[in-house]
């Protein structure tokens, strides 16, 4: 998918990066998903490569170790307008997959048709039941002192057929959620599309393989703006489109994808006003000999490089977390933010996702509410953000992924990213984990005691991000 366009979308644009970046003396790679020109409202996929800062990494060690008290971040390290919040997506938490007029999404169809493709044979039919329990989610955010909440809107809940008639029950649900957030002094940040395309459009013309999706996405976005834009002023257009492209289209279709044209490249250049960066982990970059059989991957489209978790000294880049693909390397986050500063004009940046998962069978964490690894991970990464700010990076906020345990795509419910535990054996009851309780204390500093700087002022204009 070379280009997605929505010609009427012309507020502030964002760039979003999901980084698995790594160090090998000079090379740091990251794959990004970029929105294009502000005036045109075009969105496309981009890969960025950049050199790392020359300062050597400070190793954490092969295992998790808790921070000393004086190393734990404090809220007053940050300006009062710096935003702390949490993120989710519709399919992963809402449930109610066929209630109140909602149409099926591609993920509904996939999980029902190929249940064996999900590691625990589950689906998002009920998920965390946030469609019915959204007020408990809002309460959890308020209990943690969070000031912003990033969530997505289910396209097929609003437009069951992908286009045409609007489902008023879907509009009503999101109105209730948005109003509840605002009533509790929490600012909504809305993702328009988070991978759950209406199955009707997939059946009709192949979804994102057909440029007809451009006009249909435009209609969906306009419906969202019309119904929620009086209260929602910050919009993310697409969540991680590079992941969608590489995990599906590029791996299946390869060089048969439409070409990324020169015109599209020109529209992309110097087009991003604000960036959203999703950071989880990092990788070393390793030279490999050119192979004619090389297939581009999510990690690299360069036939001369591979990404590795182990360095030339035989040591991992950081301690492995509960889930197999996340190694803890907070300095990678600092490095990426400084790359944005030094090579891309220091645009305003939000950390739109950052977190780790608990997994079943982790003997070091037998109590699901005592998520000390997540707490250590988040504390170190919040400190990494502060390090970047101290070096001049313009960072405006940090969203933890995720607010609650959810359906984690192909991993089902076996991988729990939430600050809040969802008890599947007790009606999806919400229970604050140790990390959530820490945020409650962290965010409890009275606002008058926090400093203010102009460059970290909260945005009031509408904004669009991928």
Image (spheres, rainbow, N blue to C red):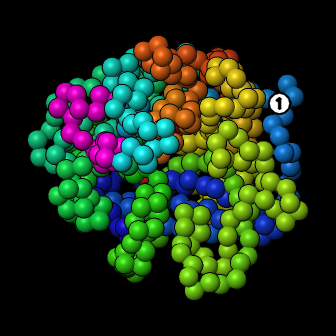
Image point 63% across, 38% down: which residue? Answer: 356
* Residue at the extreme left: 165
Q: Which x, y percent locates residue 43?
A: 38, 61
Image point 29% across, 28% down: which residue? Answer: 96
Let me know if residue 74 appears in the view.
yes
Is 183 situated above or below 273? above
* Residue at the extreme front: 116
Residues 22 and 466: in front is 22
Residues 313 and 352: in front is 313
Image point 15% across, 38% down: which residue? Answer: 166
| Left or right: residue 188 compared with residue 71 | left
Within the magenta stretch, is there residue 143? no
Q: Which x, y percent locates residue 65?
A: 84, 34
| Left or right: residue 22 compared with residue 268 | right
Q: Residues within 10 Å of mark 1 (few under 14, many from 20)?
A: some
Over which residues does the magenta segment extend? 95-113
Image-quadrant location for residue 375: top right
Query: Mark 1 highlights which residue?
Result: 66
Report helix, strand or loop for mark 1. Answer: loop
Q: Which x, y percent locates residue 164?
A: 11, 46
């Amino acid at each position: 998918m070379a280009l997605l366009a929505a010609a009427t979308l012309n507020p502030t644009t964002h760039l979003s990066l999901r980084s698995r970046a790594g160090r090998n003396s000079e090379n740091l790679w990251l794959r990004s998903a970029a929105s294009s020109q502000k005036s045109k409202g075009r969105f496309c996929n981009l890969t960025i490569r950049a050199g790392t800062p020359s300062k050597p990494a400070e190793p954490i060690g092969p295992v998790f170790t808790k921070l000393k008290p004086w190393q734990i971040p404090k809220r007053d390290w940050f300006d009062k307008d710096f935003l702390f919040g949490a993120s989710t997506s519709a399919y992963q938490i809402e449930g109610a997959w066929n209630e109140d007029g909602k149409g099926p999404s591609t993920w509904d169809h996939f999980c029902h048709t190929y249940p064996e493709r999900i590691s625990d044979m589950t689906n998002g039919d009920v998920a965390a039941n946030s469609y019915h329990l959204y007020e408990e989610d809002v309460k959890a955010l308020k209990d943690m002192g969070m000031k912003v909440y990033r969530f997505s809107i289910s396209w097929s809940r609003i437009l069951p057929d992908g286009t045409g008639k609007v489902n008023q029950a879907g509009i009503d649900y999101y109105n209730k959620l948005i109003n509840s957030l605002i009533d509790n002094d929490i600012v909504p940040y809305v993702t328009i599309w988070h991978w759950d395309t209406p199955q009707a459009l997939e059946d009709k013309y192949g979804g994102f393989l057909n440029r007809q999706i451009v006009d249909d996405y435009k209609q969906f976005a306009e419906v969202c703006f019309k119904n929620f834009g009086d209260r929602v002023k910050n919009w993310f257009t697409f969540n991680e489109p590079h992941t969608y492209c590489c995990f599906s289209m590029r791996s299946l279709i390869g060089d048969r994808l439409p070409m990324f044209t020169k015109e599209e490249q020109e529209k992309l250049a110097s087009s991003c006003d604000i960036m959203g960066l999703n950071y989880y982990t990092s990788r070393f970059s390793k030279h490999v000999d050119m192979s004619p059989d090389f297939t581009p991957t999510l990690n690299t489209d360069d036939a001369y490089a591979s990404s590795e978790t182990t360095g030339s000294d035989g040591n991992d880049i950081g301690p492995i977390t509960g889930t197999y693909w996340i190694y803890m390397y907070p300095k990678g986050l600092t490095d990426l933010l400084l790359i944005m500063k030094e090579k891309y004009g220091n645009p305003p940046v939000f950390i739109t996702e950052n977190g780790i998962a608990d997994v079943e069978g982790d003997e070091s964490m037998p109590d699901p509410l005592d998520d000390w690894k997540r707490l250590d991970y988040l504390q170190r990464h919040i400190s990494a953000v502060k390090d970047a700010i101290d070096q001049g990076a313009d960072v405006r906020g940090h969203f933890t992924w995720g607010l609650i345990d959810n359906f984690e795509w192909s991993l089902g419910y076996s991988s729990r990213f939430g600050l809040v535990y969802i008890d599947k054996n007790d009606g999806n009851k919400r229970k604050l984990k140790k990390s959530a309780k820490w945020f409650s204390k962290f965010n409890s500093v009275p606002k008058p005691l926090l400093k203010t700087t102009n460059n970290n002022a909260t945005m009031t204009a509408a904004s669009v991000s991928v």
